[in-house]
Amino acid sequence: MCGAMHRLIFVWGLLLMALSTAAQSPVTPPSLEPTDVQQLIADIIEDLSAQDESEQDYSDLTEQLHALAEHPINLNTATPEQLRALVFLNDFQMASLQQYRDSLGPVYSIYELLCLPGFNQLDVQRLMPFLRFDEQAAQAAPRLKLRKGRSQLALRFRTQLETPAGYSPDYTGSGRYLGNKHAYFLRYSYQLGQKLQLGLVAEKDAGEPIFDGTFKTGIDYLSGYVALNDYKRINKLIIGAFDAGFGQGLTFWSGLAFGKSGTLGGSKRSFGIKPHASAYEAQYLQGVGLSVNFTKKLEFTLFGSYRRVDARLADTLDSGELAFTSLPETGYHRTLSELANRSAMPELVAGGNLRYSLGNARLGLTFVHQQISGSFDKTPAVYELRVQPTEKTALGVDFNVGVKQHRFFGEAAVDCNGGNLAAVLGGMFNLSSTVQVSLIGRSYSSSFNTRYTAGFAEGSTANEQGVYIGLSLLPARGWKLSAYADLFRFPWMRYGIYSPSFGRDFLLYSEHVLGGGVSAQVRWRYKQKAVNQSGSTVVGATPVVQQTTNSGRLQLTCAVSRSLTLKSGFYANIYATDSIAREAGFALTQDVAYRFSRVPLQINFRFAVFDTPSWNTRVYSYENDMLYSFSVPSYYSRGARTFVLLRYSPLRMLDVYMRFAQTYFGQEEQLGTGADKLQGNTRSELKMMLRLRF
């Protein structure tokens, strides 16, 4: 194993020298290389998610970016709401795009964007697949003639090649899986221009039973929606599964939300209401959402949801009310105990938002009431001031105002049940065409109810105060430098730390176009926070120690030709506490993307080696995956990982995907525990998907 690592490091070093030689070639005028959309989307999501330590479902985002690549936005007619779909741009860049177009007229070429304040060559190259530059005005939306719409049907199969112990009929431990080890996914969508959308999603996870009478619908997860857009005074009408997000996420937010990242931090891009088109089974809404334009300046959104959520039941109280101890959000229903939790408690969510827009200013008022028809029956943990209530009524006010080249935003919310407050206030300042600064302060009450919230935070939208400062520089052509410093404190105890504490988080991120189709990205992050000392023998108290993590990433990308792209990555993590000696882990990755010129076939391949002495130094790296899927495996222990992804499109209406991935653990004889235990030191996965467009 060590010999293989040494060989890969040697080859990787040769590649570095080759790329550096290319970088030393004479400076030429900037050119925009052809972009591999699959790799580009993977890079965008990796950048956005690199600092997020929570589990997120990125399938909606991957679908959104793929759809934008297939149907690019017309920059010359795009509305601000359409431009907000370009999630990898910061607020300054979006404002710069709109200002350039509105002041100078139609944009005729992607090369014009190289002159815009706040953009460098890499930014413009990322935009290439998602923009077009037609001069004509947007056409009137078609009438609701269903036969003129377009449909998509996707069918996916996934399985683990090895068989864990929990699938064996001889397994006697707890948690035996009731279904087979295969996973199935079905997604159908219909779209009539921008007017009408229909969707249906069905999913069976590995281990869940299917069509055996366990579930009324035959399968564990089944959801759908109907959405009507821009019809007379109706801005949006959604019936079925949907998400909602307003302001800065303090009063109400369901669905995907990003925190700190390598891009310049700023205000959240509230979306109002939108269909829930993913198979993520937690914290989405099921009911009706309606957004109406009273006037051009005044928009009112009303939503209501009623569905049963998973809950771990405890007992029935004397009053006859059901009691529960937790609300699991894994979405797994594979065992008898998980099935007992499924859809155990009814939840009602109702609310509304009033938004007033005037020029470059927006003011919003949000009200929401959420109630679970049961009672928490648990003893509060030592760090909890109170058990999370099952009923929440919240009221919030938010604003977003542009003043010349600067932007100010904020939100204040109150949890009416306990009078707890949460507030965030920020500004983004355009100091010049090459220098932007953001400043964000937040203060969240220790007992603020965090259900359906997604405020800017190090942890959750409760028990936190902090100040964030971000900086974005364009010091030279083809070079972009970003950094942030975040200082935060937790006024009360929290999970894993039985004392009020503080922490700091610093990041430096640089991307540079070296020339000859070669670009480099360097990321370094330092984070310090307090944790309980593990394994303490002190009686009556838990000592607190300082934990520090240094993580670094170097990536080099080379567009060798229109068909071939190479990307090399080096990841390193260094972990230490006051009681644990320093640990260091690393990973090396090599990606190859090749598109055949005469055959409608594209191949993405990766080989990686890793050496991390413990879970503390694990490395996360986003991998290319098929549509409606995402993969962010953790590299831990010592071993190697590889995957190959094939996309074959024999017809314009047909795409066939196949993906094989395998991880080898060199120091292990068995993997996992309990029902997930595997004999051997490899874990392999096979995926296949068929997508039909008609």
Image (tube, grey):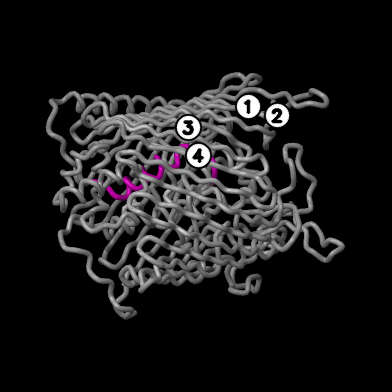
Q: Earlier in the sequence, mark 1 or mark 2?
A: 2
Instruction: Give me the C-alpha separation between circle 3 and circle 1.
Output: 19 Å
- Camera-near label (3 vs 1) is 3
The location of residue 438, given as percent across then percent down, is: 40, 34
Numbered disc in front, either 4 or 1: 1
Question: Would you name the residue on which mark 1 appears?
Answer: 530
Name which residue lies at 39% across and 53% down.
62
Label 4 close to label 1 by CB (< 8 Å): no
Left or right of 181: which side holds 32? left
Q: CA distance from mark 2 to mark 4?
A: 40 Å
Q: Is residue 561 visible?
A: yes
Q: Is residue 193 above or below residue 487?
A: below
3 or 2: tag closer to the N-terminus:
3
In the structure shown, which secondary structural element does the residue marked by tag 4 occupy? strand
**Residue 7 screen position, x and y as percent:** 37, 27
Report if residue 572 is visible in the image.
Answer: no
Report the span colored magenta.
35-55
Do callouts 2 and 4 mark residues in contact (Cβ within 8 Å)? no
Q: Which mark is residue 65?
A: none
Marks 3/2: CA distance? 23 Å
**Quarter that holds the C terminus:** bottom left
Tags 1 and 2 touching, CB below 8 Å: yes
Q: Of the numbered discs in the image, which one, if any, rests on residue 664?
A: 4
Pointer 3 and pointer 2: residues touching (CB < 8 Å)? Answer: no
Q: Which residue is mark 3?
A: 468
| Marks 3 & 1, CB-CB < 8 Å contact | no
* Residue 499: assigned label: 2
How many discs mark residues in the rendered view? 4
Q: Is residue 613 left or right of residue 198?
A: right
Location of residue 545 with respect to 168 vertically, above or below: above
Estimate the x, y position of residue 642 in percent, counting from the top left: 42, 42
Is 36 within the magenta?
yes
